[in-house]
Amino acid sequence: MYDQARAQQPPDKVGGSTERRAPGPESLLPADERDRLALRLQEALNNFAGSPLEALEEAEGIFDAAAAHLANSLAERRRALHEGWQGHDAETQSDELRHAMRQYREITQRLLRI
């Protein structure tokens, strides 16, 4: 049966806490941070008509915050990936190296799409 209320919820809010998520890339920003920035942006958009300059300054600050969070997340992801394969013998650790290569490919392809 079609559940209209459930269909209108954001994808990360659908289902209970025990529901398994479909496999796919994890977000580069935590959900709570994405939600907080999206709410701030919506408020800036709502305030544009009454205070355009203030709204633009707020939007610029939100953009800067999102870019900083993204840069930090990517730096941490790169550090973790690098530590995972650096110093491993290519013959004895081929599965780990393959896994690291897939992760590099996935994150780079995601970056190239945005």
Image (tube, rainbow, N blue to C red):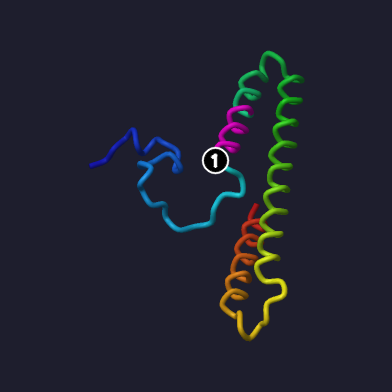
Nearer-the-camera pick, 108 or 71:
71
Decide: is 94 above or below 36.
below
Image side of residue 38 versus residue 82, left or right = left
Task: Please give the range of residues in magenta.
Answer: 32-40
Majority secondary structure of magenta residues: helix
Dot 1: within a 10 Å radius of its alpha carbon, few (fewer than 14), some, or many (20 or more) residues? few
Residue at the top extreme, as displayed: 50
Q: Tell me where residue 73 appears, x and y as whole percent.
A: 67, 49
Residue at the bottom extreme, as displayed: 91
Decide: is 33 above or below 22.
above
Q: Secondary structure at mark 1?
A: helix
- Write the residue at 58% across / 71% down: 99
Q: Give the image quarter of residue 79.
A: bottom right
Q: Give the image quarter of residue 4.
A: top left
Q: Tell me where residue 71 appears, x and y as whole percent.
A: 73, 48
Quarter containing the N terminus: top left
Image side of residue 7 versus residue 60, left or right = left
Q: Is residue 38 magenta?
A: yes
Q: Is residue 1 magenta?
A: no
Decide: is 25 above or below 98.
above
Callout 1, which amino acid? Ala
- Write the residue at 56% across / 34% down: 35
Circle 1 residue: 31
Q: Tell me where residue 23 appears, x and y as whole percent.
A: 45, 58
- Write the residue at 56% across / 77% down: 95
Q: Tell me where residue 51 appears, x and y as whole percent.
A: 71, 15
Nearer-the-camera pick, 1 or 94:
94
- Write the residue at 69% across / 65% down: 83
Count of numbered tags: 1
